[in-house]
């Protein structure tokens, strides 16, 4: 009798666990979509800004600072 009650309890608990797993899967799917969207947006911003040009832009806009720091200035060519 005790074994039968344990089996029934396990069977009634199983559908409840499925609800939690569906909610968990929905949450993980939502987080995956948000993560992919963040990667796409940050990639687009990085592509537009192009950080390789930032030192050249700074050297062009602030030449007096780079004249005062010749060691750093020699690594940044103006093109």
Image (tube, grey):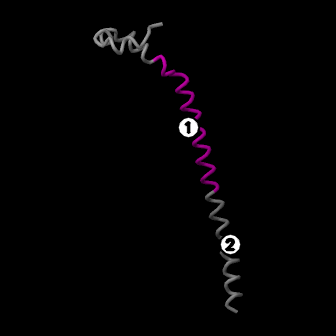
Labels in figure, total:
2
Question: Where on the picture, by quarter, is residue 3?
Answer: bottom right
Please determine whether, in this image, residue 54 is positioned above or below residue 31: above
Describe residue 31's horizontal placement relative to residue 9 as left or right: left
Residue 51 highlighted magenta (yes or no) = yes
* Residue 76 image offset from top left, x and y in percent: 42, 13
Mark 1 neighbour density, 10 Å: few (under 14) some (14–19) many (20 or more): few
Residue at the image position 62 percent from the left and 64 percent from the top: 20
Residue at the image position 54 percent from the left and 22 percent from the top: 48
Q: Residue furthest toward the top?
A: 79
Mark 1 or mark 2: name the one nearer the start of the chain. Answer: 2
Q: Nearer the viewer, residue 50 or 18?
A: 50
Describe residue 59's horizontal placement relative to residue 65 as left or right: right
Residue at the image position 52 percent from the left and 26 percent from the top: 46
Kindly identify which numbered label has been placed on residue 16: none
Identify the secondary structure beneath mark 2: helix
Please determine whether, in this image, residue 57 is positioned above or below residue 22: above
Question: Where on the picture, by quarter, is residue 36?
Answer: top right
Identify the secondary structure beneath mark 1: helix
Residue at mark 1 to residue at mark 2: CA–CA distance: 36 Å
Residue beneath disc 1: 38
Residue at the image position 61 percent from the left and 46 percent from the top: 32
Please determine whether, in this image, residue 3 is positioned above or below residue 20: below
In what quadrant of the picture does the N terminus appear?
bottom right
* Residue 39 image offset from top left, x and y in percent: 57, 36
Residue range of the region highlighted in magenta in the rendering: 25-53
* Residue 34 image offset from top left, x and y in percent: 58, 43
Residue beneath disc 2: 14
């Amino acid at each position: 009798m005790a074994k039968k009650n344990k089996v029934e309890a396990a069977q009634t608990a199983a559908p409840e666990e499925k609800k939690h797993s569906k909610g968990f899967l929905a949450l993980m799917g939502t987080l995956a979509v948000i993560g992919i969207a963040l990667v796409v947006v940050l990639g687009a911003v990085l592509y537009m800004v192009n950080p390789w040009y930032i030192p050249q832009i700074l050297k062009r806009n602030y030449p007096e600072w780079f004249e005062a720091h010749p060691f750093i200035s020699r690594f940044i060519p103006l093109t």
